[in-house]
């Protein structure tokens, strides 16, 4: 876990240092495509796993509850940040 977090912070540091490079400004589309590809591959691996597919009814409700809770929590947190830090009238 430490190596994953360290790698992420290293990437943040390098990205911050190189933020003015024009090539880095063009990576947004490739990042989105890469994420979609990873999600597709994850779906294929889940669909090919018979243990997961056979127990989908059992795990499906838990997944729906967890994902719905995550989305609602993110929306509530975003709303709070918007209200606390970005006041009306352009004042911060």
Image (cartoon, grey):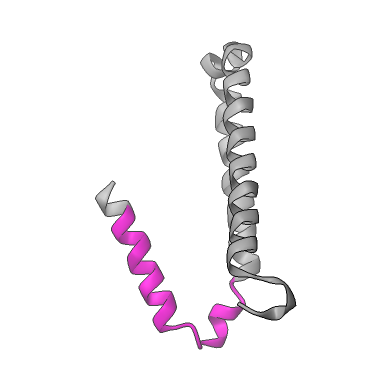
Residue 27: image quadrant is bottom right
Task: Give 26 or 86, whichever is nearer the viewer.
Answer: 86
Does 7 sit above or below residue 45? below
Percent position of residue 48, x then y: 58, 24
Percent position of residue 58, x then y: 58, 12
Task: Give 26 or 17, whichever is nearer the viewer.
Answer: 17
- Residue name at image x 60 percent, y 47 percent: 74
Does 61 sit above or below residue 78? above
- Residue name at image x 37 percent, y 60 percent: 8
- Residue name at image x 56 percent, y 28 percent: 46
Q: How many numbered marks, from 0 up?
A: 0
Task: Give 13 or 52, whichever is nearer the viewer.
Answer: 13
Q: Which residue range is magenta in the image?
A: 5-27
Q: Is residue 2 left or right of residue 22?
A: left
- Judged by its main secondary structure, the magenta piece is helix
Is residue 37 inside the magenta stretch? no
Residue 9: image quadrant is bottom left
Is residue 12 inside the magenta stretch? yes
Report whether residue 70 is seen. Answer: yes
Q: Residue furthest right?
A: 89
- Residue name at image x 54 percent, y 18 percent: 52
């Amino acid at each position: 876990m430490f190596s994953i977090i360290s790698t992420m912070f290293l990437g943040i540091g390098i990205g911050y240092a190189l933020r003015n490079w024009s090539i880095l400004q063009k990576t947004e589309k490739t990042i989105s495509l890469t994420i979609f590809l990873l999600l597709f591959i994850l779906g294929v691996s889940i669909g090919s796993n018979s243990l997961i597919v056979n127990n989908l009814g059992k795990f499906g409700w838990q997944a729906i509850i967890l994902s719905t809770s995550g989305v609602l929590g993110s929306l509530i947190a975003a709303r709070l940040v918007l209200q606390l830090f970005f006041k009306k009238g352009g004042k911060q």
